[in-house]
Image (cartoon, grey):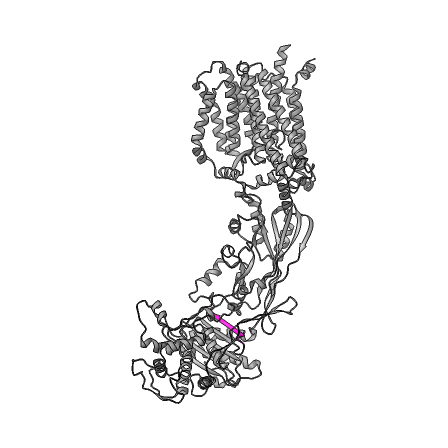
């Protein structure tokens, strides 16, 4: 009966959309790593991603037994753990493209910044939920802003501009949900625009280049602009129906670097065409719609804030990543949720989906 | 409850999310539906790789068909652009194989950073390197091996100033110089005939197309265009004569320095040509350099050695050196005086050791007494020719200098030819602003000093005009353009010969006097030891910067001149000492080839 009630109260739309995206993701990874797999005789990436999908599904089912509100109680130690993790990356992390993002733990390389996103959502939701009802003045929000600012700075220092922006967007969503006045938002945006030159000076040279090249990829067609140019060629040449699975010349002949991770969407565009792209965008639409609906129906403020934070994160990731492959966003190392290869990101995202399901489940439970 | 209080905000968020999705969808529609064909073409271009096959340059043959310059099979390693920065590991692995420092590679990659073409890194790839590159292909994505024949100068510095050399086209040449729109990394003629005849010699590059993946692994062979080899050149140069000439120059320069006669004698220019056609048989400029150094891009060390040499090895002094013509100019002054009736052959003029109008003397301070034209020219008497200058006036001297080709380039097929400097009042004003032309200047001009400069080739042409009874055959270096199989593709058209307008009687008088120079009692009497008689004129060009330049011009055999030789040795002292012995050896070789052997060795 317990199981029965679970099954009835599961958000099947959400499960369907996520499952479909993960399935499509595995197909894309298989295609993107095809030449590697042929060369080594082992479809390593697909196997590894599938294995983690399985493990994560089991973990999700297991976690659904516990009320998400338990997290509210361990928010403080989680927050501290997060800071330690981010500091650790700075000192023992591997660097790639001038940024330190990876930690080797036994056989697994993890990307702490992926987990940090989830932890930030949980902690900030807990932090805001505690006092949400009494907020009125701008100054009431300052502690919350400071609370996010510390990990934000640590990630910036890595330097991982993409993740830092994700933190900011998550915080933005939750602040809006907790009653942050639109007027203040407008003022903050104004201040941001005024301070733009200062931010420009803080950026590392390669980050500046990415933005310059984003504005004009032809500036460096075989350098920083290479990814974007090749990605646009891949997507554009997919036309309406795509070149077919495993038949994308850009992807199969390795013209598109990182095509199983950050640029996986370009493989989708090339091999599945405009129609495939529509399906994927629709699936993301479903996830966003369900996320916000769960927020609307959540039993408590913590649940509402969690759901909003998660939805903002998914939406931002999707927009920035797809926008990047389509040449309307600068190149940042932000993976596409459920589609990109990467077990840290996959685990984080599936955990967050589990949280959404959990919020929805508890609400329905009370109705009975 | 926040979600109840701010439900409208959640609604707004949903609308915003839908807008974001629509933006992405719109962008996708633009890329895939609206611009799809454009990107489709780009994708095709991506997987087709065209590898250039450089056409072999034409072979250079000497007049008898001996190969002077050919090509060796060669490969060049190039790197295609992929990531920025370039993968350090690939560069390091490549550096180990081809033995080129990573920093040097980076410099080349940087230079080529705005091009789609692969960057050519190193051209002289050995078979061992080739094998290693082939073995490690998988670890070296983007590394390409292109076929590029390597220019091979068989006799190293032999005739380098005429033949020239090739090298990679420079950025300057592509943008505004001689090779507009040539791709970066192309090998082109940079100097000498390699440059002048580049468009014939270069040929047409071929290519082959393949479908490849990004690592350069060939997936499928597509079409190919075979390269068209360049036209070969049949030169007028006589390899054996050239070799003898170079050896003679080097030995004699060494002798002049070691004997103490001319410790500063390091630079020289000699040219031998056929007075009846203008065909140049040998051309030497010293110091020289090995053109093979330039083929693979010259090293900084070698370049510094050449570039810092105070004697300019890169200048072809035969056409690019301007010297006071000295006594050989008396041929022109003499011709002018006889032609214009300013003197008769038999008029005797008294040389008291100085001219009576201005105190200007003979070089050695001697006084030769009563002289007719023949004796004056044979003994190279200054006072006699000062008087000729006095009677002619500078304008007449200039007019005749022009007839003999002084003051304008000969038009030989080489870059960097200078005009010389005519002894005109205008030229004096340019050189010494504010100073006017004096009678002393005319005197100086009459004996080939002062404001009066000529290139060694121009001096050879003065002699050539005398030898050919007054016909100027413009000098040239290339006889024929040849096809790959050795058949004649095209006979090279040269500038037509012209009559200089000096009567045969005058020329006969000059010829007789010059013959006397190389006889017993002349200033170059040791030439009488040659198996056949020659005519000559020695000279000494005043050099304000050091010891005088030694000059020697000659032609022979006198009964039917076949060859004219002009030689100058910078800071070599008197012509008969500095330049004569070199010319002697060249004649010796020339006559040896015809079956005549010298009765005695050259006098040093």
Please say if B550 is above or below B349.
above
Quadrant into which the C terminus of chain B falls: bottom left
Tally the marks.
0
Relative to the observer, which residue lies in front, B414 or A114?
A: B414
**Magenta segment includes A324:** no
Q: Which stretch did the figure color magenta?
A: B276-287
Q: Quadrant of residue B20?
A: top right
Residue A240, position in %: x, y? 67, 35
Q: Residue at x 45, y 25 (%)?
A: A188
Q: Can residue A76 be seen here?
A: no
Residue A333, position in %: x, y? 55, 34
Please say if A176 is above or below B210.
above
Instruction: Indicate left or right for A284 with B568 as reference.
Output: right
Instruction: Indicate left or right for A15 with B384 as reference.
Output: right
Q: Can residue B231 be seen here?
A: yes
Please say if B358 is above or below A12.
below
Relative to the observer, which residue lies in front, B482 or B75?
A: B482
Q: Quadrant of residue A257?
A: top right
Residue A148, position in %: x, y? 49, 24
Residue A98, position in %: x, y? 51, 38
Instruction: Indicate left or right for A253 with B353 as reference.
Output: right
Please say if B528 is above or below B322.
below
**Magenta segment includes B286:** yes
What is the residue that sits farthest to the top in this orientation? A368
């Amino acid at each position: 009966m317990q199981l029965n009630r679970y099954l009835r109260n599961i958000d099947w739309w959400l499960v369907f959309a996520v499952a479909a995206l993960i399935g499509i993701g595995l197909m894309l990874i298989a295609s993107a790593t095809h030449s590697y797999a042929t060369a080594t005789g082992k479809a390593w990436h697909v196997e590894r991603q599938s294995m983690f999908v399985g493990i994560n599904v089991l973990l999700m089912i297991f976690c659904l037994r516990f009320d998400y509100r338990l997290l509210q109680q361990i928010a403080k130690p989680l927050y501290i753990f997060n800071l330690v993790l981010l500091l650790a990356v700075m000192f023992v992390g591997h660097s790639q493209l001038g940024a330190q993002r990876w930690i080797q733990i036994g056989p697994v390389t993890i990307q702490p910044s992926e987990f940090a996103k989830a932890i930030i959502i949980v902690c900030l939701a807990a932090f805001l939920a505690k006092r949400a009802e009494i907020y009125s003045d701008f100054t009431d929000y300052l502690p919350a802003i400071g609370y996010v600012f510390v990990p934000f700075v640590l990630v910036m220092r890595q330097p991982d501009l993409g993740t830092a922006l994700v933190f900011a967007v998550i915080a933005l969503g939750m602040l809006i949900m907790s009653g942050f006045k639109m007027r203040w938002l407008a003022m903050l945006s104004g201040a941001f625009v005024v301070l733009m030159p200062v931010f420009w000076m803080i950026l590392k040279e390669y980050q500046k280049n990415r933005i310059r090249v984003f504005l004009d990829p032809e500036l460096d067609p075989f350098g920083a602009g290479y990814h974007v140019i090749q990605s646009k060629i891949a997507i554009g040449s997919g036309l309406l129906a795509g070149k077919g699975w495993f038949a994308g010349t850009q992807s199969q002949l390795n013209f598109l670097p990182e095509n199983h991770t950050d640029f996986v969407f370009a493989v989708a565009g090339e091999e599945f065409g405009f129609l495939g792209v529509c399906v994927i965008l629709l699936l993301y639409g479903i996830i966003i719609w369900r996320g916000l609906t769960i927020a609307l129906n959540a039993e408590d403020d913590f649940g509402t804030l969690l759901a909003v934070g998660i939805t903002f994160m998914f939406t931002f990731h999707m927009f920035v990543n797809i926008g990047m492959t389509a040449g309307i966003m600068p190149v940042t190392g932000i993976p596409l949720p459920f589609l990109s290869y990467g077990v840290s990101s996959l685990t984080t995202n599936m955990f967050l989906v589990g949280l959404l399901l959990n919020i929805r489940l508890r609400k329905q439970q009370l109705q009975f | 409850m926040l979600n109840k209080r701010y439900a409208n905000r959640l609604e707004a968020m949903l609308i915003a999310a839908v807008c974001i999705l629509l933006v992405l969808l719109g962008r996708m529609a633009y890329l895939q539906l609206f611009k799809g064909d454009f990107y489709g073409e780009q994708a095709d271009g991506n997987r087709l790789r065209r590898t250039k096959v450089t056409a072999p340059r034409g072979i250079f043959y000497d007049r008898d068909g001996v190969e002077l310059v050919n090509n060796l099979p060669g490969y060049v390693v190039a790197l295609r652009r992929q990531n920025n920065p370039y993968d350090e590991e690939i560069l390091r692995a490549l550096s180990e194989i081809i033995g080129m420092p990573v920093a040097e590679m980076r410099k080349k990659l940087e230079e080529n950073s705005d091009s789609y073409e692969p960057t050519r890194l190193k051209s002289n790839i050995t078979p061992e390197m080739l094998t290693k590159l082939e073995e490690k292909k998988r670890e070296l994505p983007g590394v390409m091996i292109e076929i590029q024949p390597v220019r091979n100068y068989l006799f190293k510095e032999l005739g380098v100033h005429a033949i020239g050399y090739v090298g990679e086209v420079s950025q300057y040449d592509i943008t505004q110089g001689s090779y507009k729109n040539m791709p970066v990394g192309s090998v082109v003629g940079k100097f000498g005939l390699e440059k002048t005849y580049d468009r014939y010699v270069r040929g047409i590059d071929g290519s082959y197309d393949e479908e490849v993946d990004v690592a350069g692994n060939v997936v499928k062979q597509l079409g190919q265009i075979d390269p068209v080899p360049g036209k070969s050149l049949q030169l007028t140069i006589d390899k054996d004569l050239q070799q003898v000439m170079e050896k003679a120059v080097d030995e004699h320069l060494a002798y002049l320095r070691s004997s103490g006669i001319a410790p500063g004698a390091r630079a020289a220019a000699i040219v031998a040509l056929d007075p009846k056609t203008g065909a140049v048989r040998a051309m030497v400029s010293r110091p020289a350099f090995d053109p093979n150094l330039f083929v693979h891009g010259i090293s900084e060390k070698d370049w510094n050695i050449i570039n810092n040499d105070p004697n300019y090895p890169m200048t072809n002094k035969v056409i690019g050196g301007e010297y006071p013509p000295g006594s050989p100019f008396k041929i022109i002054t003499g011709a002018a005086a006889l032609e214009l009736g300013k003197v008769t052959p038999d008029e005797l003029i008294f040389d008291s050791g100085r001219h009576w109008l201005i105190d200007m003397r003979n070089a050695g301070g001697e006084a030769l007494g009563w002289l007719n034209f023949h004796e004056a020219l044979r003994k190279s008497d200054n006072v006699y020719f000062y008087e000729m200058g006095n009677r002619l006036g500078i304008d007449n001297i200039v007019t005749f200098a022009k007839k003999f080709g002084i003051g304008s380039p000969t038009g030989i097929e080489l870059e960097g030819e200078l005009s010389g400097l005519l002894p005109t009042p205008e030229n004096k004003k340019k050189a010494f602003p504010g100073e006017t032309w004096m009678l002393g200047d005319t005197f100086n001009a009459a004996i080939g000093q002062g404001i009066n400069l000529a290139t060694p080739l121009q001096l050879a042409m003065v002699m050539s005009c005398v030898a050919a009874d007054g016909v100027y055959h413009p000098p040239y270096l290339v006889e024929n353009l040849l096809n790959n199989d050795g058949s004649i593709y095209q006979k090279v058209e040269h500038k037509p010969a012209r009559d200089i307008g000096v009567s045969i009687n005058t020329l006969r008088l000059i010829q007789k006097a010059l013959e006397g120079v190389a006889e017993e009692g002349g200033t170059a009497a040791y030439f009488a030891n040659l198996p056949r008689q020659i005519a000559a004129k020695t000279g000494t060009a005043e050099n304000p910067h050091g010891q005088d330049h030694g000059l020697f011009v000659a032609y022979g055999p006198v009964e039917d001149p076949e060859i004219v030789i002009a030689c100058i040795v910078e800071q070599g002292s008197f012509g008969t000492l500095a330049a004569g012995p070199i010319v002697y050896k060249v004649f010796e070789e020339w006559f040896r080839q015809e079956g005549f052997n010298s009765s005695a060795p050259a006098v040093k």
